[in-house]
Amino acid sequence: MDAEILDCRGLMCPMPIVKLAKKIKEIEVGKVLELLADDVGSKEDVPAWCKRTGNELIEMKEEGGIFHYFIRKK
């Protein structure tokens, strides 16, 4: 998947969401942003943020303690 990457590993709540909200404004509508996070709280925060803002959470997966979120800007 061709996505811009936002690396938020090592950041605790609410920083991944703060950085996500800022970065999503910088990309074009329809583009995909991959958010990397290792904060367990992001499993609830990211889907809730997407629902609240109308952006689309395409995929969410975990690999080796790192959460990967693929978010399409709406």
Image (spheres, grey):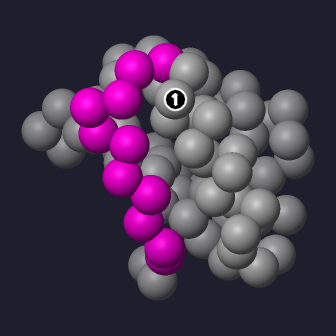
Does the magenta segment cover residue 42? Answer: no
* Residue 39 against residue 23 in the figure, above or below: above
Answer yes or no: is residue 26 visible: yes
| 68 sits left or right of 14 in the view | left
Tell me what residue is drawn at x 82 percent, y 75 percent: 29
Check the picture and name the quadrant holding the C terminus.
bottom right
Toward the left, the furthest residue is 64
Does the magenta segment cover residue 4? Answer: yes
Q: Main secondary structure of the magenta part?
A: loop
Question: Can you give x and y, in whole percent of width and height, for residue 68 in the image?
Answer: 38, 48
Residue under label 1: 15
* Residue 4 against residue 14 in the figure, above or below: below
Quarter of the image where one finds residue 67:
top left
Tell me what residue is drawn at x 72 percent, y 32 percent: 49
Tell me what residue is drawn at x 60 percent, y 34 percent: 17
From which residue to which does the magenta span run? 3-13
* Residue 2 against residue 38 in the figure, above or below: below
Question: Can you give x and y, in whole percent of width and height, for residue 37 in the image?
Answer: 36, 38
| 33 sits left or right of 47 in the view | left
* Residue 36 against residue 17 in the figure, above or below: below
| 64 sits left or right of 61 in the view | left
- Per the image, label 1 sits on a secondary structure element best described as helix
Answer yes or no: is residue 57 visible: no
Quarter of the image where one finds residue 24:
bottom right
Tell me if mark 1 has few (under 14), some (14-19) or many (20+) residues whose alpha carbon lies within 10 angstroms of its own.
some
Question: Can you give x and y, in whole percent of width and height, for residue 55 in the image?
Answer: 79, 52
| 17 sits left or right of 38 in the view | right
Tell me what residue is drawn at x 49 percent, y 75 percent: 3
Q: Amino acid at mark 1?
A: Met
Check the picture and name the quadrant holding the N terminus.
bottom left
Question: Can you give x and y, in whole percent of width and height, for residue 66 in the image?
Answer: 24, 39
